[in-house]
Amino acid sequence: MVNKLYQPYKPNLDFSGLDHIVVGSGMGGITVATWLAKAGKKVAIFERHYVPGGFTHSFKRKDGFQWDVGVHYVGNMDEDSSLRSFFDFLTDGKLEWESMGEVYDVANIDGSEYQFKAGKENFRKQLISYFPEEEKTIDSYLKIIEKTNKRASAFYFEKIFEPWLSKTVGWIFRKRYSKFSKKTTWEVLKGITKNERLIAVLCAQCGNYGLSPKNSSFGAHAMVIGHFLEGGFYPIGGADQICEKTLEVFTAHGGKVFINADVTKIITENNRVKGINIDEKFIACKSVISNVGVNNTFNHLLSEADKNKCNFSLKNVQPASAHICLYLGLNQSSEALNLPKHNLWYYKHHDIDKIFDEATLENAPENFAYISFPSAKDPNWEIKNPGTATIQAISVGNMEWFENYKNTNWMKRGEEYLKLKLKFETEMLSVLFKFFPQIEGTVVASEVSTPLSTENFTNYKSGEIYGLAHSPKRFTLSFLRPKTKIRGLFLTGQDITLVGVAGAMLSGLLCATAILKIGSWKIFKEIRASKYS
């Protein structure tokens, strides 16, 4: 069956007359591509994977099970929110969302359970019920979150300023935000409370930005916490509907998507983009928009001379953390097994930094697990897959643990590698059975992905899923903005803004604005006035 949304790349296809080429089909890429296509530009997306979507795609197996690879929930999706309006614009209102309910996250820290409830006041009251002596601290925390995020809005908006405006006005926005972004989450929280258990609870969702409290920027923490304050939502039909519904609109406006298209070089001349190379095939365009991460863009797709022109250096910023994931298929429904919609964050003890710092392949699941139930979140799952359910269980990973297998091929890494994955599966299952004993005996499908799997499909050399680490240093990098010093070269994706679907979408919006300038804001004005807003 031929997929009408994308086609395999072949060097003999007609690629003439392109205004913009987008490298990579993750959320940032498909956002800017669709925005430009709706503005009447001729746009093509080139994706190295055999399916588009980046971390919004899902994978399927012959037994009928399907799992998401990156999207487990999205916040701020109430019908009157700006984020919802953006999604409706990208998908012409065809992407539907299901609320995860009153409780969207649960943290279990050495046996004690803490619920995260939707709604700022509900969230506040629930925390106070756990820590009644810390009411003033909790109120102070919420005020700091709000203040930080207000300054973050200006900080991200400044990324589309022209250089002269950035130098004369933009520095004010950057400086005001730096009071929070340059501090670690631990530093800020330790400044308002000495209660380390409360700090652990407030940081229980730190896996959403990939760093422990003493390593993460409070700016990243505040954005993620604020993003989910009104609850969690899940795309009806699965995470891949985000990409599919967006690409339906993109292709309806003349956009083209090519898979198995591994861009090998961005071609420039006299400090201007001329096009791309896929192996020896040159494809011309007016501009290139890279959505494959700044590390891949500058260290693999551009020449050393081009890199130097951009004043680009990642010497002091590490890649984000990697992960290992167990995917399970069960032979009973979510309802029959009483599986929750909410996610579970499990920590063996409240010293989250110690858990992350001392993680090994042997102890990772025993000390930390993030457990998600996609089939329970999706009201369409039971209709399409009656009598079955799915679970995903994630723990911290490290590419160094798999160094001996880096030169092997996907699905052909040998027996010793399979033994390591089986050991992880066994240990993670013991954690799952402890919290959900009812699933024992119902597992009929299982698969484990490692940082090597992530590297294979994304070309992220450390197997990271969140790009650059969300450390305080990251927020000082002036070159993390859509427009580069090479004319016609633009950047999008989570490295430019923040982790997650919403962060990547914001980067796409900023990139489209940098390209179209006032034209994109005219489009957005139409969004707010349209039937999709």
Image (spheres, rainbow, N blue to C red):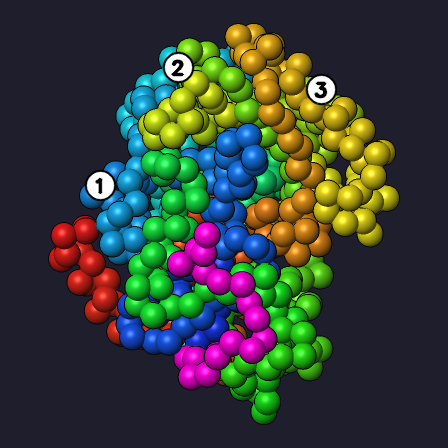
Q: Is residue 296 magenta?
A: no
Label 3 crowding class (10 Å Cα cut-off): few <14, some 14-19, many 20+?
Answer: few
x%, y% of residue 348? 64, 18
**Mark in front: 1 vs 3:** 3
State the residue position of label 2.
335
Identify the disc placed on residue 79.
1
Q: Nearer the viewer, residue 368 or 71?
A: 71
Question: Which numbered disc flags the more N-terminal residue, 1 or 3?
Answer: 1
Residue 364 visible: yes
Asked if marks 1 and 3 touch (Cβ < 8 Å), the reply is: no
Give the answer, above or below, for where 10 lies relative to 336: below
Q: Residue at horizontal 41%, vertical 80%?
A: 19
Q: Amino acid at mark 2?
A: Glu
Q: Residue at horizontal 28%, vertical 72%?
A: 39
Q: Residue at horizontal 47%, vertical 22%?
A: 389
State the residue position of label 3.
426
Q: Amino acid at mark 1?
A: Glu
Question: Which numbered disc flags the more N-terminal residue, 2 or 3?
Answer: 2
Q: Amino acid at mark 3?
A: Thr
Distance CA(mark 2)–CA(mark 1): 27 Å
Q: Nearer the viewer, residue 82 or 336?
A: 336
Label 2 crowding class (10 Å Cα cut-off): few <14, some 14-19, many 20+?
Answer: some
